[in-house]
């Protein structure tokens, strides 16, 4: 017998669909009904609907998707944006025109909100997609070997499943706005032409989310009000707390967002580089190198050029071995000037060098404050990168070269996927060693300011408790006030056997699983290359141990948490 659905739903309650499939079908049916209402009212229904599927780690793909939806609607097309993980292959097969916009995370991996989609798309049971017309836009950084790899993989797989490519994929570098806009216009014009859609062709007609006037081209000059050392002076690390005055900027943020800092290169390094190139008096080039070009990290193009120019150099010898890890090890701690010195007399001139220097990019940091608790300001928790003579560009700019009450160019990078639970009663588990604690300080202050009743559990650690327990006083106070329900600490080098946050997770396996069963949201912030992977391995182990149903069941349990947006990460 068919169980009738709730009033207003056309999907039977016992239909064999997941919550995500039901959500998509409900929207699809509602769209058809809405189109019928528009027809009956004498208004033209969209000629076709463009489904924009988003894979994002930092929010840039969402910005592009908003523009695509706006452009589609302005052309008389329907448009809707959906995270890739919220789309099943079956739902994908029912779409007519699909645009995928995705970044790439880690070593050529799918971003966090696209992993489940990709897993399902690779399956032998994935449906054929002959009725789907598609195009893919990749967002990435050419400085990485796996540039736009996620976009490339999805593009190829859609073709393998029989979908028809509308337009060739475009892979955008860090300055993605202009090529993305050109590609968007070309793809949407193709869709409009083949469907007979009629519209103005511009994106301005369609409503879009309000955008801040402050961005990487026009950052807000924020006064740096506080620069305070958090770690002890004799720590192996230098972790600092910064507070930026938002003044009359109109910038609003949520706990969990990121702040982009526009750095300025070290004048001493700029001077040494120009002196080496015989251009020490070139003030125009000095300003260019100081504010617009990356001179700490050599580009792949510069490395290739130097190898060709100086085949007997040490760099050329390392590259000749063909081992990427060896090259990475050799490059660690070396900057552009080091490589020019290594090339000797065969190094390029200043004019020859400039085309190989990439644009100086803003650095993004997880915000460590809550707008409710700290109105008018935004806080960051940053580790200063120092390695012999090598220094991190932005971290040491903030630590050393921004004077008292001087201004720093900043702009907001929203991260809607990484936020405090909307339900103030929901439990929250936060795993953030080192500077990974940053957003969780903001989360705790947010929940305290809201008066949220939900329990909060933090796993934090670093090397030594005596020197590296940042925000100890604040966390102690939050525990005393009952805001921080549980605090598990892991200081790896305070004993012979190293202890990490994942060690503490395993030790409290039963309680951690109980929190998840009670609806807890679980967050991870910090290093992507090792910590985040080790934490996920430990989490899968906890689930498998407590459920006793094997590894496959644990993996599906964790996938369900992802689908429910109850397991999210902010990793870098």
Image (tube, helix red, strand yellow):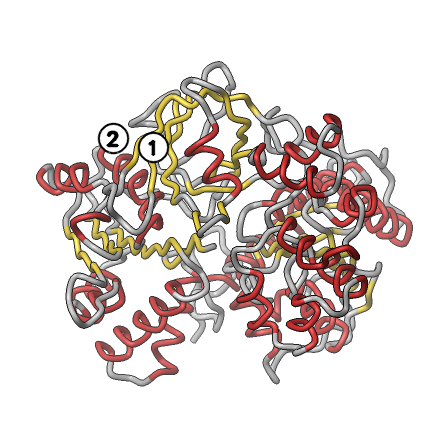
User: Which residue has dot 2 on it?
Assistant: 449
Residue 479 percent coordinates (x, y) = 12, 43
Nearest the viewer among 559 and 398 is 398
Q: Say few, some or many: other residues with alpha carbon within 10 Å of mark 2 (under 14 / 14 to 19 / 20 or more).
A: some
Find the distance from the CA under tag 2 to the CA under tag 1.
Answer: 9 Å
Name the residue: 21% across, 64% down: 512
Residue at the image point whose x is 57% and y is 55% from the top:
334
Circle 2/circle 1 CB separation < 8 Å: yes
Classify residue 216 as left or right of residue 239.
right
Please identify the residue farthest to the left as the structure is shown: 480
Of residue 507 and residue 71, the one placed in the foreground of this image is 507
Q: Whole-percent x and y of residue 548?
A: 24, 83
Which residue is outermost to the top? 248
Q: Residue 46: in sight, yes or no? A: no
Horizontally, is 375 left or right of 507 in the view?
right
Q: SS for tag 2?
A: helix
Camera-side mark, 2 or 1: 1
Image quarter in which the N terminus is found: bottom left
Q: Position of residue 215 (x, y in %)?
A: 61, 31
Question: Which of the 4 image quadrants contains residue 540?
Answer: bottom left
Label 1: how many Cα within 10 Å (few below 14, some 14–19, many 20+)? many
Residue under label 1, please give it: 370
* Relative depth, front residue between 169 and 261: 261
Mark yes or no: residue 331 visible. yes
Q: Quadrant of residue 84?
A: bottom right
| SS assignment at label 1 | loop
Q: Which mark is first along the chain, 1 or 2?
A: 1
Task: Check residue 135 in the rendering and tell me which mark sits there, or answer none.
Answer: none
Q: Residue 310: x percent and y percent?
A: 77, 64
Q: Is residue 229 above or below residue 348?
A: above
Above or below 305: residue 348 = above
Residue at the spot x=39%, y=63% of the render?
Answer: 532
């Amino acid at each position: 017998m068919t169980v009738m659905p709730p009033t207003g739903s056309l999907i039977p309650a016992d239909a064999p669909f997941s919550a995500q499939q039901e959500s998509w079908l409900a929207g699809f049916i509602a769209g058809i009904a809405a189109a019928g209402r528009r027809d009956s009212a004498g208004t033209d229904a969209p000629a076709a609907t463009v489904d924009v599927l988003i894979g994002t780690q930092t929010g840039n793909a969402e910005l592009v998707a908003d523009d695509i939806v706006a452009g589609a609607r302005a052309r008389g097309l329907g448009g809707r944006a959906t995270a890739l993980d919220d789309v099943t292959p079956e739902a994908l097969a029912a779409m007519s025109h699909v645009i995928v916009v995705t970044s790439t995370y880690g070593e050529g991996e799918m971003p966090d909100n696209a992993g489940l989609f990709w897993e399902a798309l690779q399956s032998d049971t994935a449906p054929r997609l002959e009725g789907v017309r598609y195009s893919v836009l990749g967002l990435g950084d050419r400085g990485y070997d796996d540039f736009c790899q996620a976009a490339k993989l999805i593009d190829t797989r859609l073709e393998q499943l029989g979908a028809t490519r509308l337009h060739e994929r475009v892979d955008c570098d860090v300055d993605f706005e202009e090529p993305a806009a050109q590609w968007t216009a070309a793809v949407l014009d193709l869709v409009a032409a083949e469907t007979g859609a009629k519209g103005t062709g511009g994106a301005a007609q369609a409503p879009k989310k309000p955008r801040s006037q402050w961005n990487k081209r026009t950052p807000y000059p924020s006064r740096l009000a506080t620069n305070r050392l958090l770690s002890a002076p004799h720590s192996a690390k230098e972790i600092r707390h910064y507070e930026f005055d938002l003044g009359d900027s109109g910038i609003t943020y949520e706990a969990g967002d990121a702040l982009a800092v526009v750095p300025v290169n070290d004048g001493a390094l700029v001077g040494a580089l120009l002196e080496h190139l015989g251009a020490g008096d070139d003030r125009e080039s000095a300003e260019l190198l100081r504010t617009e070009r990356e001179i700490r990290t050599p580009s792949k193009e510069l490395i290739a050029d130097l190898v060709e120019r100086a085949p007997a150099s040490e760099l050329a010898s390392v590259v000749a071995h063909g081992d990427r890890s060896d090259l990475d090890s050799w490059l660690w701690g070396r900057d552009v000037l080091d490589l020019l010195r290594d090339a000797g007399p065969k190094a390029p001139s200043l004019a020859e060098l400039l085309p190989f220097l990439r644009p100086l990019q803003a650095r993004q940091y997880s915000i460590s404050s809550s707008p409710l608790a700290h109105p008018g300001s935004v806080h960051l928790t940053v580790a200063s990168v120092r390695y012999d003579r090598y220094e991190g560009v932005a971290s040491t700019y903030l630590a050393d070269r921004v004077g008292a009450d001087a201004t720093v160019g900043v702009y907001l990078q929203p991260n809607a996927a990484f936020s405090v639970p909307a339900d103030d009663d929901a439990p929250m588990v936060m795993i953030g060693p080192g500077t990974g604690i940053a957003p969780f300080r903001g989360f705790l202050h947010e929940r305290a300011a809201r008066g949220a009743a939900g329990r909060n559990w933090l796993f934090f650690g670093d090397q030594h408790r005596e020197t590296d327990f940042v925000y100890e006083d604040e966390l102690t106070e939050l525990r005393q006030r009952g805001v921080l329900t549980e605090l598990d600490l892991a200081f790896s080098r305070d004993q012979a056997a190293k202890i990490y946050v994942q060690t503490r997770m395993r030790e409290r396996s039963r309680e951690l699983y109980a929190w998840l069963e009670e609806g807890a949201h679980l967050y991870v912030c910090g290093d992507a290359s090792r910590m985040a992977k080790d934490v996920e391995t430990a989490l899968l182990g906890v689930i498998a141990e407590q459920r006793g149903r094997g590894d496959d069941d644990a993996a599906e349990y964790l996938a369900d948490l992802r689908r429910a947006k109850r397991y999210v990460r902010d990793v870098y």
